[in-house]
Image (cartoon, rainbow, N blue to C red):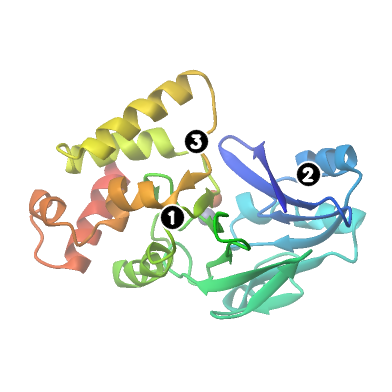
Amino acid sequence: MQIDRLPALSDNYIFLLHDPTRQEAAVVDPADATPVLRRLEQLGAKLVAIFNTHHHHDHVGGNARLLQHFPAAIVYGGINDQGRIPGQTVSLQEGDHVTFGDRSAQVFFIPGHTKAHIAYYFPPVKPNDTGELFCGDTLFAGGCGRLFEGTPAQMIDSLSKLRQLPDNTRVWCAHEYTLKNLQFALTVDQQNPDLQHRLAIVEAARQRSEATVPSVLGVEKRTNPFLRWDDREIRAKVKASNDIQTFSRLRGMKDMF
Ligand code: ZN
Ligand code: FE
């Protein structure tokens, strides 16, 4: 399975999965149909599936036009998103599996950003391969999504499911927010050498207009404050006394940053 990252709108990424032996493709969160159709034409591939993580327009905006070109494509989304995702044909919940080509992905129900948000995790096939996590607007490189329809407790539960995946898992999040996320992270975690190092790398990459997605989950575990609600120093910094309070304060501070 090859994964193409297609920039869309102002800061979204669409991910195109390609199976060259079958000349088939699938797309994760098509914000816009145009870049997807262009790449499918270059590849000579047919679109067989749309994997949506949640209903926001910058994730499903291309569904309708892609279905005009590929009416047989299956549109996957969370069960609680039925009626909110254009063309949704299959409704998924925690523990479900979806297939693409010779790969199978596990579905996680990860509410918080929205009440219906799901993630798709393709585990590694061979021992040294990476797993591929498509997590929409829940986990970002260096941050997490805003809580539009969920609570801090729900988001901790959801991020806990992602945090337990292997360190070498690649994190394919849907926005290029990394630099601003890490600038915020530094304000609550100044003494973290891994974070300082990561920020320098990301600053240099963005100066060259390079993408910072996918990131690597092990790096997120060490540097992303929104996966570290139980870190003693961060907790002290935001003057909180438990996990939920720590997470709420971090999220509230980031909303104002
Ligand atoms: Zn969203
Ligand atoms: Fe989004």
Residue bearing the label numbered 3: 212
Q: Is 225 placed left or right of 22 in the picture?
A: left
- Which residue is painted at 19% across and 67% down in the image? 243
Q: Is 150 placed left or right of 68 in the picture?
A: left
Occupied quadrant, residue 19: bottom right
- Tell me the element at label 1: strand
Q: Is residue 105 above or below residue 256?
A: below
Residue bearing the label numbered 1: 139
- Are circles 1 and 3 on residues that touch, CB within 8 Å? no
- Are circles 2 and 1 on residues that touch, CB within 8 Å? no
The spot of residue 13 in percent (x, y) is: 61, 43
Identified by mark 1, the residue type is: Leu
Residue bearing the label numbered 2: 36
* Lower sequence index among marks 3 and 2: 2
- Tell me the element at label 2: helix
In the displayed image of the protein, which residue is found farthest to the top?
208
Q: CA distance from mark 2 to mark 1?
A: 23 Å
* Lower sequence index among marks 1 and 3: 1
The spot of residue 237 in percent (x, y) is: 10, 48
Comparing 10 with 93, the one in front is 93
The spot of residue 16 in percent (x, y) is: 72, 49
Identified by mark 3, the residue type is: Thr
Q: Is 42 placed left or right of 202 in the picture?
A: right
Q: CA distance from mark 1 to mark 3?
A: 14 Å
Identified by mark 2, the residue type is: Val
The residue carrying pointer 3 sits among few (fewer than 14), some (14 to 19) or many (20 or more) residues within 10 Å by Cα, namely some
